């Protein structure tokens, strides 16, 4: 099998964050990218959800239909 090099430009913060996740799984960046590309090639799909919506505030719990905040099954105003 012939190999090839492919270079990409990344924002440093994105690279650092993503590579830390790879490391937490015991993967090198090269291994993780190869896994992703192998999955794409074998399934002819991109194994990602494009329905993701970033929460507006991660520290604010979701509101109930009554407008109260719900924490651990308890309602708070």
Image: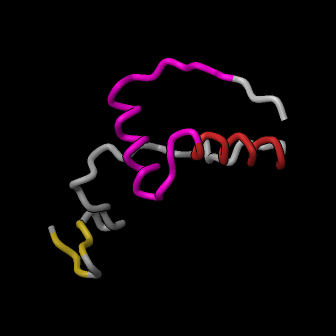
Residue at 23% x, 56% y is 60
Residue 3 in magenta stretch: no
Q: Residue at x 58, y 19 (%)?
A: 7
Residue 75 horizontal/vertical position (percent): 22, 76
In percent of width and height, residue 11 lies at: 39, 23
Q: Residue at x 36, y 40 (%)?
A: 17
Image vertical order of residue 56 relative to residue 77, above or below: above
Residue 51 lies in quadrant:
top right
Instruction: Specify start and end residues of the magenta stretch as a single range.
Output: 5-30
Left or right of 8? Residue 2 is: right
* Quadrant of the snapshot with the C terminus: bottom left
Task: Give whichever of 27, 65 is nearer the camera.
Answer: 27
| Quadrant of the frame with the N terminus | top right
Q: Is residue 57 left or right of residue 22?
A: left
For the image, the number of numbered tags is 0
- Quadrant assignment, res 50: top right
């Amino acid at each position: 099998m012939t190999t090839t090099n492919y270079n990409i430009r990344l924002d440093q913060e994105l690279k650092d964050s993503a590579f830390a996740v790879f490391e937490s799984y015991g993967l090198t960046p090269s291994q993780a990218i190869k896994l992703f590309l192998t999955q794409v090639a074998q399934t002819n799909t991109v194994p990602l959800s494009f329905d993701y919506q970033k929460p507006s505030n991660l520290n604010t719990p979701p509101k109930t239909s009554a407008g109260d905040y719900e924490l651990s099954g308890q309602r708070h105003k």
